[in-house]
Image (cartoon, grey):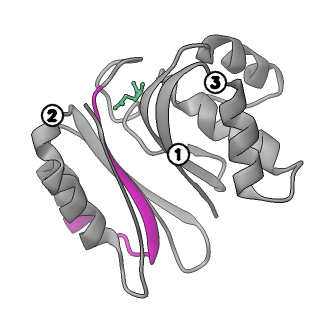
Amino acid sequence: MCGIVGAIAERNVVPILVEGLRRLEYRGYDSAGLAVLRDARSLGLRRAVGKVSGLQSKLDADPLAGTLGLAHTRWATHGGVTEQNAHPHLSGDRIAVIHNGVIENFQEIKDELLEKGYEFASETDTEVAAHLVHDYVKAVTSLVEAVRKATQRFEGAFALLVVDS
Ligand code: GLU
């Protein structure tokens, strides 16, 4: 079962996110990742197959900082256990998504998004959420509205965390 952590603070949230993932390790997972909103409003991403300690090693080698972020431990349902399939999933440099559960009708939404020119970097059902929210957010007035419109399309059971840079 996956774990989801979100944090916003006046200081760097990366240590808070990693500690949150450590506290959720007992739930079981196959990979871990996090994304933060950096100073220039760009999204920074780090992911690793295996333990949260592996993610921490990547952060030690290539540090990341930001005051708002989201983190995930994945239990794969769609797509193999790879870094590309680990969450968060991005759409452009704008939307970051993490997801617990399954979007059962992801294939029909994926076909529609491919038709519109969105490129997929993973085999997950989750990535449709990133691109669909991105597609809607360009047309509506708020991220909340875009997420609401996207989730109305999804069949299945899921929890999502979404950031718009
Ligand atoms: N279905 C998603 C995936 O395979 C999320 C799995 C989970 O809940 O960790 O990536």
Compared to residue 73, the image places residue 59 above or below, namely below
Q: Which residue is mark 2?
A: 28
Q: Position of 111 compared to 15: left or right?
A: right
* Residue pointed to by mark 3: 154
Determine whether 114 is above or below 91 in the image. above
Report x, y in % for residue 107: 62, 12
Who comes first in sequence, dot 3 or dot 1?
1
Residue 125 relative to residue 143: left or right: left
Residue 63 in view, yes or no:
no
Which numbered disc, 3 or 1, marks the residue closer to the eye? 3
The kind of residue on which mark 3 rests is Phe
Instruction: Residue 103: give x, y in percent of width and height.
Output: 53, 21
In reply to whether residue 162 is colored magenta, the answer given is: no
Secondary structure beneath disc 3?
loop
**Pointer 2 or 1: first along the chain:** 2
Query: Does mark 1's beta carbon lie closer than 8 Å to ligand 1?
Result: no
